[in-house]
Image: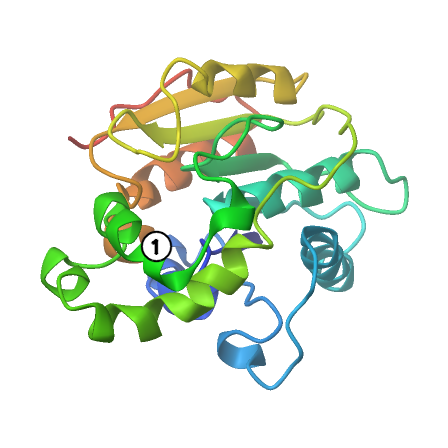
Amino acid sequence: MLFCLSHAGGVATTVYRAWQAELAPEHEVVPVDYPGRGTRSHETPDSSPEAVVADVVRRVARQVTPGAPWAVFGHSMGAMVAYRVAAHACHDPALTAPQVVFVSGRRPPGDRPVRPLGALSVDDLVADAVAWGGIPPEVGARPHLARPLLRRLVDDLRLSHDPPGPVAPLTCPLHVLWSDGDPLTRTDRIGRWAQASTGHVGFHRFAGDHFFLGDGAGLAIPLVREVLRQTALDRLPVDALAAPS
């Protein structure tokens, strides 16, 4: 079972819609929408990153049979949530630790965000979202079209910072996906993810902007499939697979 978590402003059931067909029948893909988003749009959105993490922990606890294998993939905000959920499961005897964790497009835990969250506004984000690759330049050039798209992003970004307090390292393999063209991560700092797990940590570099994995995060699928295959065979995960350029 592979839980998939989306970036700020995204909807997991939309972003990862094609993953089930690509990874079946070996793996069950479970996109997890945050409260107030997608299939849960009728629910009240969470008010803190801790609440977002706790919500996903409850989902994992409900769906994973004790001792059964599971994994988690998250991009950007979703990577923060995936890492925190996995850390909770690794150190809670009532839960089963994940077999492997994938974090994509996210600064290492404890690093400061590129833009202070308190300064965020819809207008501030229009130019930034174009630079990240989140909206097309032609839409960014027409703010009256861009602003409605970014209102949900502003709300989610306020939830995407690291919750306070230390986190015990993961005890399972961790795979870090990143792009040196991503303006939201720092190439000289990405290696600090190695401190986040006592297990194997693999780094996989792609080309592109913050959304380097493309529509539906599809470029990650071959990597995820291979890592899950090797994990299931109880082999050491690869140090790095060739990433598309």
Pointer 1: what residue?
A: 125
The one nearer the camera, 110 or 31, is: 110
Picture coordinates of residue 27, whole percent (x, y): 49, 53
Other-residue count near label 1 (Cα within 10 Å), few / some / many at <14 / 14–19 / ≥20:
many
Against 37, residue 60 (above or below) is above
Amino acid tagged 1: Leu
Q: Is residue 151 in sight in this rendering?
A: yes
The one nearer the camera, 10 or 103, is: 10
Residue 170 appears in which quarter of the rendering? top right
Residue at image point 35% right, 25% down: 204
The one nearer the camera, 177 or 134, is: 134
Residue 124 appears in which quarter of the rendering? bottom left
Against 171, residue 129 (above or below) is below
Picture coordinates of residue 135, whole percent (x, y): 23, 59
Q: Residue furthest right?
A: 93
Secondary structure under the numbered disc 1 in the rendered image: helix
Picture coordinates of residue 139, whole percent (x, y): 15, 65
Give the quarter of the figure containing the C terminus.
top left
Residue at image point 56% right, 36% down: 101
Picture coordinates of residue 107, whole percent (x, y): 48, 30
Against 241, residue 144 (above or below) is below
Against 26, residue 140 (above or below) is below
Residue at image point 58% right, 76% down: 36
Give the quarter of the figure containing the N terminus.
bottom right
- Left/right placement of residue 130 relative to residue 34 reads left
